[in-house]
Image (cartoon, coloured by chain):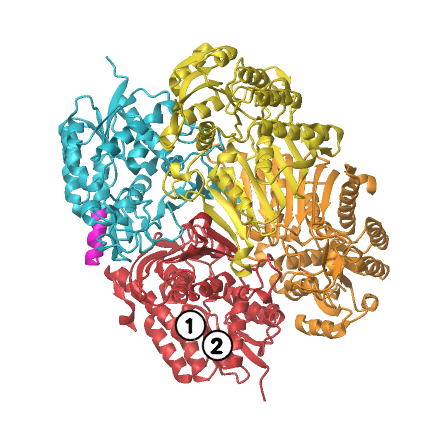
Chain colours: A red, B orange, C yellow, D cyan
């Protein structure tokens, strides 16, 4: 008998937990054609009171405090890993062993060695996987890919990507887990740099070589109160004991792509005034494309076919029924927001499951992003160019 | 005993039905502090197959095909009227008689006479009411009001509002119900002009006099197939029998406000390239404010306090936790979209119910908007200035 | 023998005097193909010390303090009238009688009666004339006209124009001549409203009917010191004797065009934060165009031919050699500014003289603009619609 | 006796020759307070017919075809070198020997060795010098420097600069002199990269280390007809004999600054759709600044002092009398263009001469820029980081 539902178990209930929960909650409402509907079976977190509250608030049927227990539950089909980076490896390995389909937050690991082990396990277990590079699911980004694939901007010469934030500009902002290498693997590089590396691979192709630098502008910060939370909205804590920041505040790197394009990348938490300024500029032999997530419903597109006298970047409001994902949402001009990217991603993943086709980006894509991250760290440490494929 | 839940009955399952359903579905997830939680009791529509499908898709417990029956159900506390304009009056009167709290789509009626009867009934029944001028609940708009109230732009001299769409530019677009005066009351004027009149009242105050013009550019259109749907995404129907367009395609009007400000307004379905270009410019003695819904997460604010050498419209990304409604949503820079305005509106309404305070805008506000609409129609017909309060 | 030079006499040496002088000084440098070169023969102003200084600064060969004397000088071929509005009529009549070619600042007169007399005199004398509606000579505006003429936006449905300034928002700003009806004719209406009326005629066609309102927000201001200058940069004068403002601070009007388009217009000196915010939005059956002088090197153009999935306003940087006037200036991307509009205008005028073709806009165009201004004033006074051609 | 005039001799009559000529022609008109007025004594070019025509068109009193002769003319006080890079050294050395004040186009030389010799000669001769990094004289850029110097954006953490053009995207575009290393020294790197290096030094300070890459996308192009002109507007030449491109089409580099800031830079002639897209983003501990020359009258400025709820990049229209250079030009809102930067630069230089103070940037600044260019070329060749001061 054909299955019509799939049971989800989610690990994590903070910022990403909320975003993933919402996606499972709403996906069938907006994509009624869905062949495989998610059942919000269980959510997992170490703090029982908190995870229980989250279960109720987000609509999960049950909760667990032990991730391994959740993963092993026979009623769970899909394990969705939205925990911090240090916890990913063990959870992915367990889920793969248990034959569960896997959704995993990015970057998949804190080190390349972990990532290799994880990707190998998933490959061996032949379980479906999706890494949550959610920005691929912005309609404007999906449209950019359509335009590139159709050859409308020709051969790509330049790719610039940036992901600029400013949430730790204040030196009194506390030393949350995202600023600790043990827990987070790296700083801006892994957290947001990983997104723009995925974007580069999605839109341009594989990176050949990279040369990068990292910088920690503020090397000591006040220790936070007991639980650090997601860190994104935490109040500054003045007058407390200080601790050492062990990750980068900012990273910048040059890259060459296999196809000959030149790449420049910036990821920082010190771009005062920028909140989630995540985007790209692409220049090809026949046109150009620009995008910025803070205006996520817009894509700038220039085509040389318009002729010199009528040429200009077209400010496309990506809300037409002909645009990717939009039919699910609202009439033209009624824009969508951040959480919609997760709904679109979950839709794509569930459709892949239903049709038994691979989802994308999968754990191997996650591995390749991790290799680029590692290459940048090596490059920054050794002050040299590093070939990405030499690490794989 | 204090109630913790309130039962909702929704009339309408098309575009607005979807938007309202989503709001009830998600409001408690994003506003967990909600004191009164909505229960999605029943949805109502005349086509049983369609309403049943909508009930399942959106998560309503039951469905009805007779609005009067829905209204009279004792398990319904709030009647939410998202039907076409011609049906509002009867439904509001019935709901008021039945002592139900009322949510009503805008404009509240097809004529001022109807609106008066409705507002009187609601007043007499002393039931809470909310008219769904959802754009008040855009965080940037709520922030604009905060700035005005705090005196930061001083005395308002100019208010310009516009609501530009282009969905019927194609002469082959069919004669849907929104183009028929019997069903829709008016065209661009009532449908989208009502929103910018509400915005004017929300931000500036009462309109004193108006002088307007309306225009129907395309006077005949092909008749649509059986059911016209919402009309916003309908395919053009070529080669069919033609029918007469009986509403305005566009309206423009001048206004003076009680406080001395000058107003200019445009509402049209013929602004080629504009989809939901709904916004305002306000200039006061100490600053200015600009907004456009197509970039709904931004507010432009200029303050003379910045001094001549540092003065410029500030492009505020309205996603900070200090901004209205934002705490419910995502960290700074993670933007929201169209349907969030309905969630915010429903939250405000439920909180008003819980605290037994009046919601806003209520049926009397709806009446005042209707009076302005009528004044503009009279003005356009008689080619003269019309004082709004003379109609009330 | 074919003439190669033409002698110019300029009346006025303030803001407009500077702009016109610069145009004569530079036109042959940028347009070397010019067949008739201007010789800066004489400049005229009532204050001898000031006009002498201006002559030296701007490069005029001589100066006069009596406009009638300048006009009658046999060595003057072209009389360029950049004096305040009250002085235009006498000067134009004298120049026409003397058979001189005429350039005249806008609006051509302070009243329609004067304008009729002037246009008749010029017609009778068969002298060439140019009214300095310089914004027609912005390359982006000329390009907009090309696009419209080529049918690329189809039939025009909506024309919106605005000219927003804020230089008298401060109540302490003194009562300069531009705020005095005797000297200036009207306020924002004639000074800047005339520009957008000309723009409407240039891009859309004749206005049929208008209905407008005017407003004076601040009715008394401190009297200025002796000479009021151009008024645009004057320091506020506190504590002086007060005088009455006798012109409008702001005007707004609706219009219908002969071709069926709907027009909305705003002209104000009270749009806090706007300096020279002069532009338009045009929507036609096949596309749209937007322009704002503060970004004068850009034109926004949308074409339905781009298809729904690739449609967006193109942000055309109007600096390509294929764009109007640009070949005279710099390579693509090297933008031009305000005074270039005067250089372009003078070039067009001199080429018209050389080819013995009429220049445009001429004194009859100036008259038609004046009729619209008068229609708006009548409309505002009588609170009624006024047909423009009834006044001609 | 105090001198009131200074005699200029200009070498070069193409693109830069036009821009410099215009500056000398107009500077006294717009800056009447000038203490030392330029006399346009002589212009020099190798093609006699062309230089004679230029002399007449631009208003030079005489012309020369031999630069050495021009330099040695006793009536020349200032030698302005607007010739191609290969010619600079000999001309600067001769001018310095002759004790002339020197204006020199950028970059000052084709190699660092040349630049060192030139700077030493100028230092030894103690003659005033100005290198024509004209973008420093954009009012918005000068304002950015004021804001930085006043501490309004705090300590600078990130500096990004870009100079994007697209004039050689077409493979049929011919092999003009700017694409030949012998004549031009380098490609995008020296031509436009030098501008953004100067900008970095002007706004942030000295670059410590750089790591860069260069790329030539199209390695062969058709040979041009006899005279290559400026190359910026040349028509594509199809079917001709091919020649080798010996310079970079694009360059990108990372940098660290002495003050700890991180820098990323891009210079390219292959950014399809970008014409003169030359600008920066700066993020500091207390605010941010953004600029792009294609909108040169605007500066984006964000200040943390505005508070989280009112914070946004201010879009400053840099046309107020309180802004740098603006008093010379037009009232607020009347924007300026490209050539004004040269007028402003010449004004500053002449005032420096009059007050016997050093001009800026001088030949030593030019040398430091050249060292950065050389460091980037070494870095790109050797694939390593290079410390700039090690080359000086």
Q: Position of residue B205 (x, y in %)?
A: 71, 40
Tell me if label 2 and label 1 are in contact, CB under 8 Å.
yes
Which residue is at the front of the view, B193 or D361? B193
Left/right of residue D126 with respect to residue B334 in the rendered view: left
Magenta-colored segment: predominant secondary structure? helix
Report the residue marked by disc 1. A87
Image height of A284 relative to C112, above or below: below
- Looking at the figure, which quarter contains the C terminus of chain B? top right
- Tag 2 subunit: A
Q: Position of residue A306 (x, y in %)?
A: 45, 53
Q: 10 Å neighbourhood of mark 2: few (<14), some, or many (≥20)? A: many
Report the residue marked by disc 2. A67
Residue appearing at x 78%, y 69% in the figure = B46
Q: Residue furthest front?
A: C1
Left/right of residue D102 with respect to residue C391 in the rendered view: left
Q: Would residue A153 be visible to someone looking at this image?
A: yes
Q: 10 Å neighbourhood of mark 1: few (<14), some, or many (≥20)? A: some
In the structure shown, which secondary structural element does the residue marked by tag 1 occupy? helix
């Amino acid at each position: 008998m054909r299955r019509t539902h799939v049971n989800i178990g989610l690990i994590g209930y903070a910022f990403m937990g909320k975003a993933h929960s919402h996606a499972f909650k709403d996906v069938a409402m907006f994509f009624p054609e869905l062949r495989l509907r998610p059942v919000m079976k269980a959510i997992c977190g170490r703090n029982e009171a908190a995870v229980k509250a989250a279960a109720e608030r987000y609509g999960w049927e049950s909760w667990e405090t032990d991730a391994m227990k959740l993963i092993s539950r026979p009623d769970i089909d899909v394990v969705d890993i939205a925990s911090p980076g240090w916890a990913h490896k063990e959870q992915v390995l367990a889920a793969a062993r248990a034959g569960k389909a896997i959704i995993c937050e990015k970057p998949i690991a804190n080190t390349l060695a972990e990532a290799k082990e994880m990707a190998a396990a998933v490959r061996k277990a032949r379980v479906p996987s999706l890494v949550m590079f959610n920005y691929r699911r912005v309609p404007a980004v999906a449209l950019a890919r359509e335009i590139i694939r159709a050859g409308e901007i020709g051969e790509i010469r330049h790719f610039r990507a940036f992901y600029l934030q400013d949430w730790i500009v204040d030196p009194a902002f506390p030393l949350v887990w995202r600023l600790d290498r043990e827990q987070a693997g790296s700083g801006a590089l892994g957290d947001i740099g990983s997104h723009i590396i995925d974007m580069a691979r999605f839109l341009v192709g594989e990176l050949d070589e990279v040369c990068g630098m990292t910088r920690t502008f503020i090397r000591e910060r006040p220790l936070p109160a007991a639980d650090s939370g997601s860190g994104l909205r935490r109040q500054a804590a003045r007058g407390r004991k200080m601790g050492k920041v062990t990750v980068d505040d900012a990273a910048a790197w040059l890259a060459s792509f296999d196809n000959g394009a030149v790449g420049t990348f910036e990821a920082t938490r010190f771009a005062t005034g920028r909140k989630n300024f995540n985007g790209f500029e692409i220049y090809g032999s026949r046109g150009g494309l620009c995008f910025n997530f803070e205006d996520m419903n817009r894509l700038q597109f220039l085509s040389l076919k318009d002729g010199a006298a009528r040429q200009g970047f077209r400010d496309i409001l990506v809300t037409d029924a002909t645009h990717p994902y939009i039919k699910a949402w609202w009439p033209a001009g009624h824009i969508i927001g951040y959480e919609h990217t997760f709904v679109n991603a979950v839709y794509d993943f569930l459709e892949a499951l239903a049709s038994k086709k691979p989802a994308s980006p999968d754990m191997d894509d996650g591995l390749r992003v991790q290799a680029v991250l590692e290459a940048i760290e090596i490059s920054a440490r050794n002050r040299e160019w590093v070939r990405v494929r030499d690490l794989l």
